[in-house]
Amino acid sequence: LFPRAHGIHGIHGIPLPEAGECINDVVFDSYGTRLAVCTNSCILIYGAQEDWPQLARIDGAHSDAIWRLSWSHSQRGDLLVSCSEDRQVIVWTEQGFGAWKKCFQKTLGAPVLDVRFASPALGIKFAAITAESQVNVFECTTPATLQRWESQDVMIQDKGKPGAVDWKPVMPLASKQDRLEVLAVGLHDRLVIAAKGARWVEQACQELKNDSAIQDVAWCPKTCRSYEVVATCGLGVQLWRLDQSKDRSPWRLELLQDLLPDKALVWRCSWNAMGSTLAACPENSEVCLWTSVG
């Protein structure tokens, strides 16, 4: 299904912050024109041009290590959300001329390990997961002013050590069934699928067959498939097939393909916009690519 391409090394150098700073996350905006980077002490934003000009720097964004970043879609105003060991999630909005300000800030019960904005068709909302496996969805109910945000808990049974979270992509003209709000939650020993009805509830779960926690999860955009595909990485890279029922019968989640049988430790994985190519970054300083052939 996804034959592996050759590993590639970095080509364009980006001017990084001070020596000794650890880069914890790197993420492009929705059109690939800006790149946000977070370290243990600051957030940096670069222009995606040949010389990678620094457009903004947010010093003291958090009081502890900043773990993850996520952009909202440009349709929703290019917001940037960050999460940190200081237990806070912060949504940033651009003020022009490289200035960014907080428009939402929330302290959770434990360090926040991952944040992810939803598709713009679902409104301005993002999910966050803490070190105690608390998953929350935050939604802005005043898009014009960004002043009011509401929170919902995502109920997960038998919580384990957390890893990452991602949304099912929703297309603008999607059917009612495809517009259902669904999250993939990667935990230490299993992948959980949760959906929103009257409230957020767990719909499917599959235990892992190795001892490595999920480090990242990426939901594949669906074009012509009748089922969903979710990628996870940690000890290797796995693809999972999800079949959503249209009635009250249980959803089915099963392993579709193991992409790295040698079980290298992999930190991040990400799909392209069409869902045809998966990228992953193992510890060997390469980027591995897989392309769909069917």
Image (cartoon, helix red, strand yellow):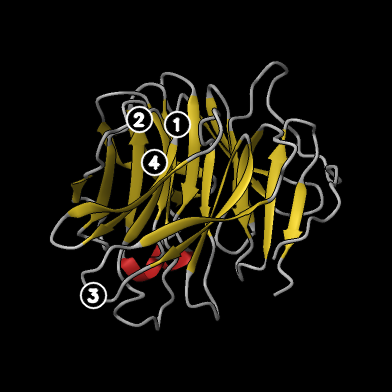
- What kind of residue is marked 1? His
- What kind of residue is marked 4? Lys
Up the image or down, 252 lies above or below 99; here it is below
Alpha carbon of mark 4 to alpha carbon of mark 3: how far? 45 Å
Alpha carbon of mark 2 to alpha carbon of mark 3: how far? 29 Å
- What kind of residue is marked 2? Gly
Secondary structure beneath dot 2 equals loop
| 64 and 170: which is toward the camera | 170
Instruction: Identify the mark nearer the N-term, 4 or 1.
Output: 4
Alpha carbon of mark 3 to alpha carbon of mark 1: how far? 30 Å
Secondary structure beneath dot 3 equals loop
Query: For the residue carrying disc 2, how many other residues have a C-alpha within 10 Å: few (<14), some (14-19), or many (20+)?
Result: some
Instruction: Identify the mark nearer the N-term, 4 or 3.
Output: 4
Instruction: Identify the mark nearer the N-term, 1 or 2.
Output: 2
Mark seen at residue 129: none
Alpha carbon of mark 4 to alpha carbon of mark 2: how far? 34 Å
Residue drawn at x 55%, y 81% as measured from the top left? 224
Quadrant occupied by the C terminus: bottom right
Q: Position of residue 91 (x, y in %)?
A: 36, 43
Q: Which residue is mark 3?
A: 247
Do tag 4 and tag 1 residues touch (Cβ < 8 Å)? no
Do tag 1 and tag 2 residues touch (Cβ < 8 Å)? yes
Up the image or down, 175 lies above or below 95; here it is below
Nearer the camera: disc 4 or disc 3: 3
| 78 and 279: which is toward the camera | 279
